[in-house]
Image (cartoon, rainbow, N blue to C red):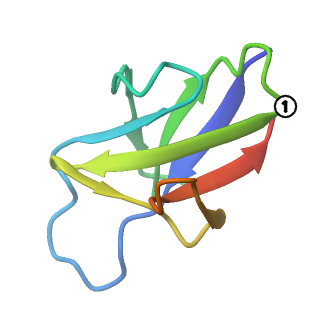
Amino acid sequence: MTVELTYTPREGIQDLPASVVVTGNFDGWTQSVRMEYCSERRVFAGMVEPGESEQLVFKFVVDGEWTTSAQYKVERDSSGNRNNVALA
């Protein structure tokens, strides 16, 4: 099963990010899923394989900067890092 994750660029920015990657527990945090911009929906989208996990834990890497998105629930891990979470 694959799951689509999307990232919406911040309102008011002039230029779209050059690179958006999603990474998380589904790829061992290796930044392996490059997202493509969909102009019709105005989002970057990428498909991930959740594997055995029922919960996806992930972050976006936007032009090299690790960030979370307000589109998804945000939780802190045991080290205090903020991550997005979603059910697979």
87 relative to 78 in the view: left or right = right
Which residue sits furthest front?
A: 78
Which residue sits furthest bottom?
A: 12
Which quadrant: the N terminus? Answer: top right
Residue at position x 66%, y 35% in the image: 4
Q: Which residue is mark 1?
A: 54
Along the line of sight, which residue is nearer the eye, 75 or 65?
A: 75
Identify whether 24 is placed above or below 48. Answer: below
Residue at position x 69%, y 38% in the image: 56
Q: Position of residue 84 (x, y in %)?
A: 58, 56
Residue at position x 16%, y 75% in the image: 14
Which quadrant: the C terminus? Answer: top right
Identify whether 7 is placed above or below 82. Answer: above
Q: Could you say whether the residue bearing mark 1 is in a helix, strand or loop?
A: loop
The type of residue carrying mark 1 is Glu
- Residue 65 occupies quadrant: bottom left
Along the line of sight, which residue is nearer the eye, 62 or 55?
A: 55
Identify whether 71 is placed above or below 66. Answer: below
Callout 1: 10 Å neighbours few (<14), some, many (20+)?
few
Q: Position of residue 58 (x, y in %)?
A: 53, 43
Q: Position of residue 22 (x, y in %)?
A: 43, 37
Q: How many marks?
A: 1
- Residue 75 occupies quadrant: bottom right
Residue at position x 84%, y 31% in the image: 54
Q: Position of residue 76 (x, y in %)?
A: 57, 63
Along the line of sight, which residue is nearer the eye, 16 or 60?
A: 60
